[in-house]
């Protein structure tokens, strides 16, 4: 690295890692928790982090900050069960509830002390708030809302991919001359790893060194986010989604009919939401929800990148579109070329009859 911190390159444009940066080793995942429950994105990231750590030949670590010795130790054990080799832990009364200042100090101190080369957080409300503060404090790079993570072994860099320009393009970002390399990943983008209860690891405790009087914000009360009766697309097993091709709100009712028959959630592309056919909570895509159902039925959706990044992790994708050249057919498991307004009622009736047969057999 030069004095101006620009990357040093040798030969044919090959990047050469600065000696100071070579001291940074290991992949870390911040384990996010609230009210005694770990956010599932933390386990998803440990699964992905395991792959990255294996490629680099380094340990995978979880990072747990909290106020309860028993609870944080349990979270560390779960991190081991989901692939971690180590768990860095800070236990302090000021960490009872999430606040930016103490959590930023704790995570920043850990990074400066133990020097990981990669730090991953969930792109949740808490994760986004914390990641931005930590990256700013450490003066390192942060790639937000990633949909894919890989290792560029030539220069030992994290290749973090995310949509850009309103979701119309995918770009891959490398942080060559700063460490740690930081990224946030939205829930349900990565596959949940299998839990192995036989795995064990080492817990490394660290002192926070912060007292309550030094913290500007105070927790007065906790008001839970009541999601009862609201869409829970990220955790649905079956989703029926409609797009611009449904033409109008009346036709979009066909999506609801099929979803009700299947006991599925209803999703939508951005144009359908912008047209007012369905509420914003049901939007799937880069600017909406990321989903990973067992079955995703997409009717009248072209399959643009903005929508694709939110649902391409589905186990089975059934696409219905009148345009045989629609991009969604490039990655759908099954494709039906035809008029959705004709096909959806036929599918709904077929499923009703099949379900009736199953109920009779039971």
Image (cartoon, grey):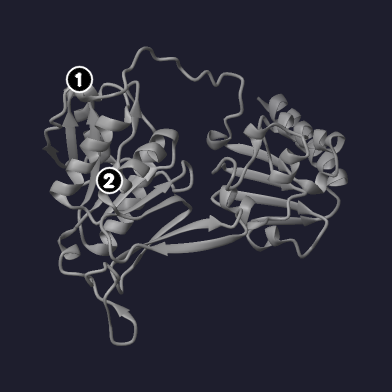
Around disc 1, counting alpha carbons within 10 Å, would you say few (fewer than 14), some (14 to 19), or many (20 or more)? few
Which disc is residue 137 wearing? 2
Q: Residue at x 28, y 63 (%)?
A: 55
Q: Quadrant of the C terminus?
A: top right
* Image quadrant in which you'd find residue 268: top right
Residue 44 position within the rendered picture, expressed as x and y whole percent measured from the top left: 39, 44
Q: Residue at x 21, y 36 (%)?
A: 106
* Circle 1: element type: helix
Q: Nearer the viewer, residue 315 or 43?
A: 43
Given contact means CB atoms under 8 Å apart, are the residues at marks 2 and 1 in contact?
no
Q: Nearer the viewer, residue 339 or 151?
A: 151
Locate residue 308 relative to residue 360 in the image: left or right.
Answer: left
Say if residue 270 shows up in the picture: yes
Q: Residue at x 71, y 52 (%)?
A: 319
Q: Residue at x 73, y 55 (%)?
A: 302
* Image quadrant in which you'd find residue 37: top left
Q: Which residue is mark 1?
A: 213
Whether residue 172 is situated above or below residue 76 in the rendered picture: below
Which disc is residue 269 wearing? none
Residue 76 position within the rendered picture, expressed as x and y whole percent measured from the top left: 22, 35
Whether residue 3 is situated above or below residue 115 in the rendered picture: below
Mark 2 / mark 1, whichever is N-terminal: 2
Q: Nearer the viewer, residue 258 or 90?
A: 90
């Amino acid at each position: 690295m030069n004095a101006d911190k620009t990357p040093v390159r040798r030969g044919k444009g090959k990047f050469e890692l600065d000696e100071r940066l070579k001291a940074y080793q290991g992949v870390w995942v911040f384990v996010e928790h609230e009210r005694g429950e770990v956010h599932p994105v933390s386990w998803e990231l440990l699964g992905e982090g395991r792959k990255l750590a294996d490629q680099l030949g380094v340990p995978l670590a979880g990072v747990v900050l909290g106020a309860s010795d028993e609870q944080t130790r349990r979270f560390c054990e779960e991190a081991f069960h989901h692939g971690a080799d180590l768990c860095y832990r800070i236990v302090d009364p000021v960490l009872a509830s999430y606040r930016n200042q103490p959590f930023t100090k704790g995570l920043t101190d850990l990074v400066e002390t133990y020097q990981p080369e990669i730090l991953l957080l969930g792109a949740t409300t808490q994760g986004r708030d914390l990641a931005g503060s930590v990256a700013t404090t450490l003066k390192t790079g942060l790639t937000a809302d990633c949909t894919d993570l890989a290792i560029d072994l030539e220069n030992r860099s994290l290749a973090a991919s995310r949509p850009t320009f309103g979701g119309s393009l995918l770009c891959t970002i490398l942080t060559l001359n700063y460490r740690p390399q930081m990224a946030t990943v939205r829930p349900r983008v990565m596959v949940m790893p299998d839990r192995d209860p036989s795995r064990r690891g080492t817990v490394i405790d660290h002192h926070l060194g912060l007292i309550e009087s030094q913290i500007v914000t105070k927790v007065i009360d906790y008001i839970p986010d009541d999601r009862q009766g609201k869409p829970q697309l990220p955790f649905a097993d079956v989703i029926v989604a409609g797009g611009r091709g449904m033409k109008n709100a009346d036709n979009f009712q066909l999506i609801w009919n099929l979803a009700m028959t299947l006991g599925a959630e209803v999703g939508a592309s951005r144009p359908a939401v912008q047209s007012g056919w369905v509420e914003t909570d049901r939007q799937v895509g880069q600017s909406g929800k990321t989903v990973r159902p067992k079955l995703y039925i997409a009717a009248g959706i072209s399959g643009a990148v903005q929508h694709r990044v939110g649902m391409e992790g589905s186990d089975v994708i059934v696409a219905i579109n009148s345009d045989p050249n629609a991009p969604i057919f490039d990655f759908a498991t099954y494709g039906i070329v035809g008029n959705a307004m004709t096909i959806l009622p036929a599918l709904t009736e077929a499923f009703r009859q099949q379900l009736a047969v199953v109920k009779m057999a039971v």
